[in-house]
Image (spheres, rainbow, N blue to C red):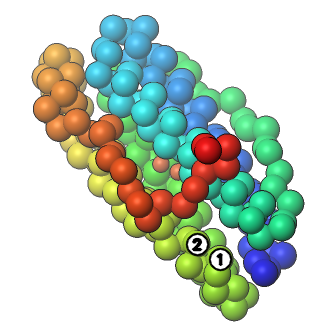
């Protein structure tokens, strides 16, 4: 059984994942309106992944017969002055979430809640990938800030948002 402290903190994390979801939707809509379809596509896809993360956590709590609370979230930033800002924001968001995920794993261990510690392992691996992807993109966007089409070409070439099936991923609630 998950520890009470872990359940409370995981419920908070569901809110953080939805906050990330909303922020990525806002960024995607911004790029879409600027007619940068590849940047838009990348962030729409990132948003869906954040929603999945939240729903994986919901499913874990349901499976453990614990209460999962669907959170409200703070409004995302929607005003951006250049092409770099949203990606920099994305990277700082991923770094913050990495700290939150690590703190959840540490809490599970302190509480001797080993099933929750194991549940967090997939998210630790996922955060390493998300930080790496976003810092690669930030480097490209900074280098080509005045050449938006180079950034769009990069996204087409690298297929950053194509994840492929991950059989080790936890099951998101509601996904069949
Ligand atoms: Fe996430
Ligand atoms: Fe993420």
Q: Which mark is residue 155?
A: none
Q: Classify mark 2: residues with Cα within 10 Å, few (<14), some (14-19) or many (20+).
A: some
* Residue located at (56% from left, 79% from top): 118
Say which quarter of the image contains residue 154. Answer: top left
Q: State whether residue 122 is above or below residue 135.
A: below
Q: State whether residue 165 is above or below residue 98.
A: above
- Residue at the far front: name it: 176
* 13 relative position to 7: left or right: left
Regarding residue 5, the answer to whether it shows in the image is yes
Q: Give the number of callouts.
A: 2
* Circles 2, 1 touching at the beta carbon (< 8 Å): yes
Q: CA distance from mark 2 to mark 1?
A: 5 Å
* 78 relative position to 36: left or right: right
- Residue 160 image position (x, y, % from top left): 27, 39
21 or 79: nearer the eye? 21
* Local SS, label 1: helix
Q: Which mark is residue 116?
A: 1
Q: Which mark is residue 119?
A: 2
Q: Classify mark 1: residues with Cα within 10 Å, few (<14), some (14-19) or many (20+).
A: many
- Residue 127 image position (x, y, % from top left): 43, 59
59 or 80: nearer the eye? 59
* 88 relative position to 109: left or right: left
> Does the Cβ of the disc 2 residue fall within 8 Å of ligand 1?
no
- Residue 89 image position (x, y, % from top left): 45, 38
* Residue located at (40% from left, 46% from top): 91
16 or 157: nearer the eye? 157
* 35 relative position to 124: left or right: left
* Residue located at (74% from left, 73% from top): 6
- Residue 98 image position (x, y, % from top left): 49, 61
């Amino acid at each position: 059984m998950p520890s009470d402290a872990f359940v409370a903190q995981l419920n908070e994390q569901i809110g953080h994942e939805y906050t990330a979801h909303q922020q990525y939707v806002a960024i995607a809509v911004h790029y879409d309106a600027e007619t940068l379809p590849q940047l838009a596509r990348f962030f729409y896809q990132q948003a869906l992944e954040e929603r999945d993360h939240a729903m994986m956590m919901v499913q874990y709590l349901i499976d453990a017969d614990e209460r999962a609370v669907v959170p409200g979230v703070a409004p995302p930033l929607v005003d951006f002055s250049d092409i770099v800002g949203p990606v920099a924001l994305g990277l700082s968001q991923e770094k913050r979430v990495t700290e939150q995920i690590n703190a959840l794993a540490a809490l599970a261990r302190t509480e001797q809640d080993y099933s929750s510690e194991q549940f967090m392992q997939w998210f630790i691996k996922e955060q390493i990938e998300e930080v790496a992807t976003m810092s690669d993109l930030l480097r490209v966007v900074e280098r080509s800030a005045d050449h938006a089409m180079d950034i769009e070409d990069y996204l087409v070439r690298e297929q950053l948002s194509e994840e492929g099936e991950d059989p080790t991923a936890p099951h998101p609630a509601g996904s069949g």
